[in-house]
Image (tube, rainbow, N blue to C red):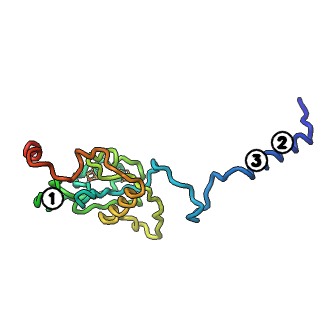
């Protein structure tokens, strides 16, 4: 068995200590805002609904696909006829009327985002929702849209299928063809 020189062992240990002292910290001091690590763009926080600035309404049509696919059944939604469509101001015939997610039960799996065919929901960067009440994280349509707007502005978000999902009314000919 090789016996290590105690002085060399001491110097090795000292070097490890010095390297660790000078290394940039890989942890952050929570909740100090200025000491937090920046979130990656791909970070998946709680789901939020997106806003279509072209026609000033949500992308969500209330189709309920996400509600049906959510593994924890923490979502509910209701659609209505879109009054903007009746006035010729939007391509969306149906629009979301009410939406609720119990974020206390959300497991941030992202399935709702994957199944939505309307670019209407995204995993936002919101993660700080601790509350003292068990059910205090039920968020409604307006709150989900507010979270979505923050996310959209932060990432300069654009829809994945702009042609298909934009609310801008189609020109009359295309509109007739698609009806
Ligand atoms: S978020 Fe998407 S999948 Fe869910 S109800 Fe709205 S349009 Fe449908
Ligand atoms: S992220 Fe998953 S658990 Fe949360 S609302 Fe979407 S589908 Fe449901």
Residue at the spot of label 3: 19
Q: Position of residue 88 (x, y in %)?
A: 12, 57
Query: Which residue is drawn at the image coordinates 89% and 40% (left, top)?
Result: 8
Q: Are marks 1 and 2 in contact (CB under 8 Å)?
A: no
35 or 117, which is in the foreground? 35
Asked if the residue at tag 1 contacts the one at tag 3, i.e. Cβ–Cβ closer than 8 Å, the answer is no
Relative placement, left or right, of 12 versus 7 is left
Q: CA distance from mark 1 to mark 2?
A: 72 Å
Q: Earlier in the sequence, mark 1 or mark 2?
A: 2
Q: Disc 2 marks which residue? A: 12
Task: Give the mark nearest the N terminus, 3 or 1.
Answer: 3
Relative to 157, 92 lies left or right? left
Q: Nearer the viewer, residue 62 or 179?
A: 179
* Residue at (79% x, 49% y) in the render: 18
Q: In the picture, residue 76 is in which quadrant?
A: bottom left
Local crowd size for mark 3, using a 10 Å CA cut-off: few (<14), some (14–19), many (≥20): few
Q: Residue at x 26, y 54 (%)?
A: 59
Under tag 3, what secondary structure? helix
Separation of disc 3 and disc 1 at Cα?
63 Å
Point out which mark residue 128 bears. none
Residue at (35, 49) in percent of width and height: 71
Query: Is the distance from the Cβ of mark 2 to the nearest ligand 2 atom less than 8 Å?
Result: no
**Nearest-to-viewer mark from 3 and 1:** 1
Q: Is residue 91 left or right of residue 1?
A: left
- The CA distance from mark 3 to mark 2 is 11 Å
Q: Secondary structure at mark 2?
A: helix
Query: Which quadrant is the C terminus positioned in?
Result: top left
Contact, mark 3 vs mark 2 (Cβ under 8 Å): no
């Amino acid at each position: 068995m090789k016996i290590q020189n105690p002085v060399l062992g001491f110097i090795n240990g000292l070097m490890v200590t010095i390297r660790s002292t000078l290394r940039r910290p890989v942890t952050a001091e929570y909740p100090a805002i200025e000491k937090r690590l920046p979130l990656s763009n791909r970070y998946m926080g709680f789901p939020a609904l997106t806003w279509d600035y072209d026609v000033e309404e949500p992308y969500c049509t209330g189709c309920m696909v996400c509600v049906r696919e959510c593994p924890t059944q923490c979502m509910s939604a209701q659609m209505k006829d879109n009054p903007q469509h009746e006035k010729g101001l939007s391509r969306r015939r149906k629009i979301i009327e009410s939406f609720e997610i119990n974020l206390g039960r959300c497991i941030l799996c992202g399935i709702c985002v994957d199944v939505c065919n309307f670019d209407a929901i995204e995993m936002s960067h919101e993660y700080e929702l601790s509350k003292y009440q068990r059910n205090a994280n039920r968020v409604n349509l307006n709150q989900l849209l507010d979270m979505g707007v923050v996310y959209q502005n932060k990432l300069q978000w654009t829809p994945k299928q702009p042609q298909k999902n934009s609310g801008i009314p189609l020109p009359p000919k295309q509109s007739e063809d698609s009806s």
